[in-house]
Amino acid sequence: MGQVGWLQRISKETFVEIEKEKRFPQGEEVLEMVDVDKLWEHIMFTFGGGKLGLEPTVYLFMPTEMIVTYEDQYMKEGIRYHTSDKVKELYQFMSSKSTDDWIAATDMDEINRKAAYTLDGDYILEMKSYMNSIVEMFKRASDNDEIIIGRAGY
């Protein structure tokens, strides 16, 4: 088991149900999903211009907005999501350059020194495909005023 990351696009109506039920969407409720597996850090580094903590993509897979599903004195867990306004902001930012331009502007050796997994030739092609899918997902969500749920971790 290792790090995993994914994004799900859902409608606002589904989001209201998730808020009420405090559960992740299942089946047909998910309009689209991009599962980037262990490459989520690399994608954030690349959209961040070689920096993991750069706004606005620092929280791409772990959005700051959360529906709390569990909380005690030590921790808080929940369903993290991007509001429709944040979706639009992220889409505008990520689509401001082509995926090739984002990758060309990023020091892959620097990413490999900082990320949990090493990225090489085949993985760069896979990452590029995921990045294109993410931008397209955010475009559809932006066009339809939808919500995106994100998750990353172990």
Image: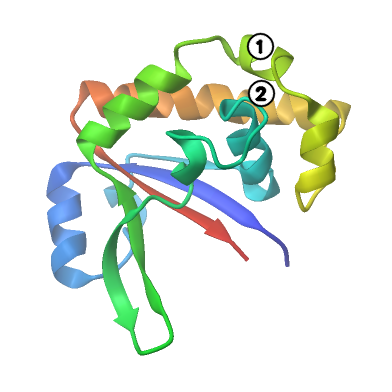
Indicate left or right for 99 with 150 as reference: right
Amino acid tagged 1: Asp
User: Is 147 located above or below residue 18 in the figure?
Assistant: above
The residue that disc 1 covers is: 100
The image quarter containing residue 25 is bottom left
Label 2: which secondary element? helix
Residue 148 position within the rendered picture, expressed as x and y whole percent measured from the top left: 33, 42
Q: Nearer the viewer, mark 1 or mark 2?
A: 1
Q: Identify the image's colour scheme: rainbow, by chain, secondary structure or one colour.
A: rainbow
| Residue drawn at point x = 20 percent, y = 41 percent | 11
Disc 1 vs disc 2: Cβ atoms closer than 8 Å? yes
| Residue drawn at point x = 51 percent, y = 48 percent | 6
The residue that disc 2 covers is: 128
Crowd around label 1: few <14 · some 14–19 · many ≥20 (10 Å): few
Q: Quadrant of the C terminus?
A: bottom right
Residue 37 position within the rendered picture, expressed as x and y whole percent measured from the top left: 64, 49
Residue 38 position within the rendered picture, expressed as x and y whole percent measured from the top left: 69, 49
Label 1: which secondary element? helix
Residue 127 position within the rendered picture, expressed as x and y whole percent measured from the top left: 68, 30
| Residue drawn at point x = 52 percent, y = 35 percent | 54
Crowd around label 2: few <14 · some 14–19 · many ≥20 (10 Å): some
Amino acid tagged 2: Lys
